[in-house]
Amino acid sequence: MSAPLAHLALHLPDEHATDALAGQLAPLVNGAHGPAGGRIHLRGDLGAGKTAFTRALLRASGIKGRIKSPTYALLESYKVSNLYFYHFDFYRLSDTREWLDAGFRDLLRDDAVVLIEWPERAGAFLPVPDLEIALLHTEQGRDASLTAYTARGQTWLNAIVPPIAAHSRHVPPPADA
């Protein structure tokens, strides 16, 4: 993966803070500060909040109705106006090439919002994300580590204001990434 451009660490004390973060990111992926679309990779253990964050982002982007987890189907897709949203969950992949064999590469477009849970299961075949969000469940909420890998992702990070109840710190990107 390419070197990170920017990093933001947040403590999200509750579900409302997680939803607020997703709510801030939604207008950005919808084109508030540049073209709509982008790739977001979500990392974290089972139960860390990847799907909850994604649902909040999709809701804040205008998705109505039921938002299913793609754990078994690998992909759920949505459309708002002319913007496509693709929510992948690669947890069940047993081979890093499975998603390629399924024809998913064509959906990794810059003009669509692509959310990928468990991107590490796809190996080195995925393009670099604009933003990677790593979630860690803690006793009191969750810690979120947001890392920008592209200029688009850096623009998003610069526009995020930490939720009032959250504690944050801007830190330089990790040297070993």
Image (cartoon, rainbow, N blue to C red):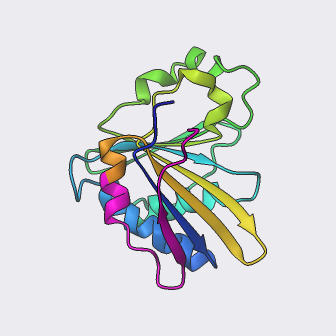
Residue at the farthest bottom position: 165
**Image: 64 above or below 103:** below
Point 74% across, 33% down: residue: 92
From the top left corner, tell me how far across and down residue 170 is, in percent.
46, 65
Is residue 126 found inside the magenta-colored segment of the image? Answer: no
Asked if 153 appears above or below 24 in the picture, the reply is: above
Left of 62 or right of it: where is 91? right
Query: Which image quadrant for residue 83?
Result: top left
Q: Position of residue 74 (x, y in %)?
A: 63, 35
| In front of the other: 42 or 145 | 145
Question: Does 164 sit above or below residue 12?
Answer: below
User: In the rendering, at what x and y percent does residue 88 appear?
Assistant: 57, 39
Q: How many marks?
A: 0
Q: Is residue 141 left or right of residue 107?
A: right
Residue in view at x 63 percent, y 79 percent: 13
Q: Residue 68 vs residue 129: left or right? A: right
Q: Is residue 73 left or right of residue 21?
A: right
- Is residue 66 in sight in this rendering? no
Q: Looking at the image, which is closer to me, 77 or 158? A: 158
Looking at the image, which residue is at 77% across and 52% down?
46
**Front position in the image: 78 or 60:** 60
Q: Nearer the viewer, residue 30 or 177?
A: 177
Does residue 161 sit above or below 2 in this rendering?
below
Magenta span of residues: 155-177
Residue 97 image point, x, y percent = 64, 16
At x 31%, y 46%, the residue is: 152
Q: Could you tell me which quadrant the C terminus lies in? A: top right
For residue 115, say whether it is visible. Answer: yes
